[in-house]
Amino acid sequence: MRDRNWAFRHLSTAQRVLGWIAFDRFEERVKVFKAEYPDDTPEERAIRVAADSAPKGARHPEVYAQNALQAAANAYALAYAYAWLYSPRSRTFGSLEKELYRRVRKFNRSELDALNSHLAQVRFDFPVLTESILPVLSRFFDEFFGPGLEGTHGDL
């Protein structure tokens, strides 16, 4: 290994890829609901997506919508953290935010609220991120989607 910065840069990239995979799984699960229940209103679909989490002991929990959103929240928070360790002024932040915005701009309000609550859970799963990384994600969400999501982003 060349040095720690090299490792942090590539760990950030690896977490970004895991985030892509998780968002793809979430989007596929939403497509399944649209195909299975074509007559659902957006509100009914939002209820289905919100309730779609893996039962205890499921063989592949990552295919459920809420589990995929949790995995995406974890991956993007860790991608930010590794990018921060690489360099607090890294250009990676801009590209991460651009990708995250591209993914979540299609979300409805309940999906944004769910992602926000999963990001809040990251605070408990990775307490070291609370002071440096989660405020950056909080500002990102406040700038693009407004502070009106469930819970406030300041609480991240």
Image (cartoon, rainbow, N blue to C red):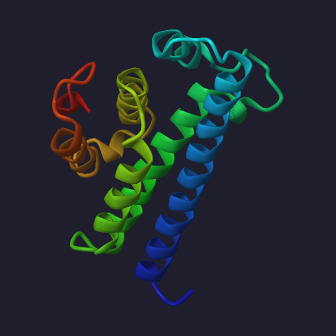
What is the quadrant of residue 63 in the picture?
top right
What's the residue at 45%, 72% (across, down)? Answer: 8
Q: Quadrant of the N terminus?
A: bottom right
Residue at the extreme front: 39
Instruction: State the image coordinates of residue 144 (x, y, percent, origin top left).
Output: 21, 44
Instruction: State the image coordinates of residue 106 (x, y, percent, origin top left).
Output: 42, 39
Residue at the extreme bottom: 2
Left or right: 10, with 106 as reference point: right
- Compare residues 113 and 77 and report the one nearer the observer: 113
37 relative to 98, above or below: above
47 relative to 69, above or below: above
Left or right: 75, with 57 as reference point: left
- Compare residues 64 and 11 and report the one nearer the observer: 64
Left or right: 54, with 98 as reference point: right
97 relative to 111, above or below: below
Instruction: State the image coordinates of residue 66 (x, y, percent, origin top left).
Output: 57, 26
Q: How many marks?
A: 0
What's the residue at 39%, 27% (across, down)? Answer: 108
What's the residue at 56%, 65% (across, down)? Answer: 14
Left or right: 88, with 9 as reference point: left
78 relative to 146, above or below: below
Residue at the extreme right: 59
Q: Quadrant of the C terminus?
A: top left
- Compare residues 152 and 40 and report the one nearer the observer: 40
What's the residue at 35%, 30% (across, down)? Answer: 116
What is the quadrant of residue 148 in the picture?
top left
Instruction: State the image coordinates of residue 80 (x, y, percent, origin top left).
Output: 36, 58
- Compare residues 99 and 85 and report the one nearer the observer: 99
